[in-house]
Image: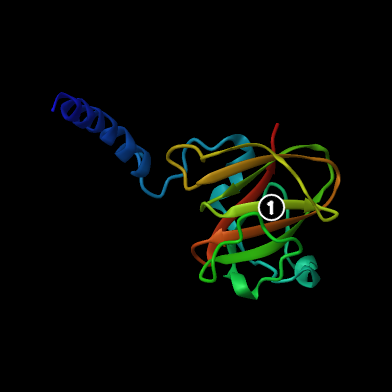
C-alpha cells in the first residue's frame, strides 16, 4: 500500500511537467514567431516549393541557405529516394528530395516545422549530424538538426512526415 502511494505521488508530480512539454506556452502570442536566432529570421516569410520525387528532378528544387520554404511533399511510395532513409515512414507518410549547394564551409542547421526525418547526403554518403533539438519556445520551428558541411552539392531527403506540408529552412550558423 505504501509503495502504491509513493508511485501515485511520483506520477502526480511528473504529470504537470509532461503536460507542459506537449502544450504551447500560455505566454506565447498566437501567430507570433518569437525567440528565433538571427540565422532563422526569414522563417516567417516562406516561399512555396514542391519537393522532388526523384534525383532527376533535383535541379528544380534547390534550397537556398537563409530562405524559408513552405514545401509540399509526396506520399512515400511515390518518392524514389537516392538512399533508403534511416526512418522511411509508412505508406501513409510523406517525403521528398531537395538539393542544397554549400559555398562556404561551416555548421548549417536544418529547421523543420514538423518532426520529419532528415537525411543529408553528399556523393551518396550520409552526413552525420552534430546537434539536434527542438525549436525555440513560442516559434513554429519544431525540429532543428545541425550538420558540419564543406563546400559542395548535397541531397536532403525528408521522410516519415505525417502531412504533405513541411516548413523547412537551411541556415548557416554564425
Q: Position of residue 52 (x, y in %)?
A: 70, 69
Q: Residue at x 51, y 53 (%)?
A: 114
- The residue that label 1 is drawn on is 119
| Count of labels in the image | 1
Residue 105 lies, with reference to residue 85, above or below; the image says above
Camera-side residue: 8 or 43?
Answer: 8
Is 29 positioned to the left or the right of 127 in the image?
Answer: left
Residue 1 lies, with reference to residue 139, above or below; the image says above
Is 109 positioned to the left or the right of 153 in the image?
Answer: left
Q: Position of residue 87 (x, y in %)?
A: 60, 56
Camera-side residue: 12 or 144?
Answer: 12
Which quarter of the rendering shows the C terminus? top right
Which image quarter: residue 76?
bottom right
Is 130 positioned to the left or the right of 30 in the image?
Answer: right
Q: Residue at x 19, y 31 (%)?
A: 8
Is 103 positioned to the left or the right of 25 in the image?
Answer: right
Which image quarter: residue 143?
top right
Colouring method of the image: rainbow
Which image quarter: residue 78?
bottom right
- Residue 146 in view in this figure: yes
Amino acid at each position: 500500500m505504501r509503495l502504491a502511494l509513493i508511485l501515485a505521488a511520483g506520477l502526480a508530480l511528473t504529470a504537470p511537467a509532461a503536460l507542459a512539454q506537449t502544450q504551447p506556452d500560455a505566454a506565447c502570442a498566437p501567430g507570433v514567431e518569437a525567440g528565433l536566432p538571427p540565422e532563422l529570421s526569414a522563417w516567417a516569410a516562406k516561399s512555396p516549393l514542391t519537393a522532388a520525387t526523384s534525383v532527376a528532378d533535383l535541379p528544380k528544387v534547390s534550397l537556398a541557405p537563409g530562405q524559408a520554404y513552405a514545401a509540399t511533399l509526396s506520399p512515400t511510395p511515390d518518392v524514389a529516394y537516392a538512399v533508403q532513409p534511416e526512418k522511411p515512414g509508412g505508406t501513409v507518410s510523406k517525403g521528398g528530395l531537395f538539393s542544397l549547394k554549400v559555398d562556404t564551409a561551416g555548421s548549417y542547421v536544418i529547421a523543420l516545422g514538423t518532426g520529419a526525418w532528415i537525411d543529408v547526403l553528399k556523393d551518396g554518403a550520409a552526413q552525420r549530424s552534430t546537434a539536434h533539438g527542438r525549436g525555440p519556445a513560442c516559434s513554429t520551428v519544431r525540429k532543428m538538426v545541425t550538420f558540419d558541411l564543406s563546400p559542395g552539392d548535397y541531397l536532403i531527403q525528408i521522410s516519415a512526415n505525417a502531412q504533405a506540408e513541411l516548413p523547412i529552412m537551411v541556415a548557416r550558423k554564425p
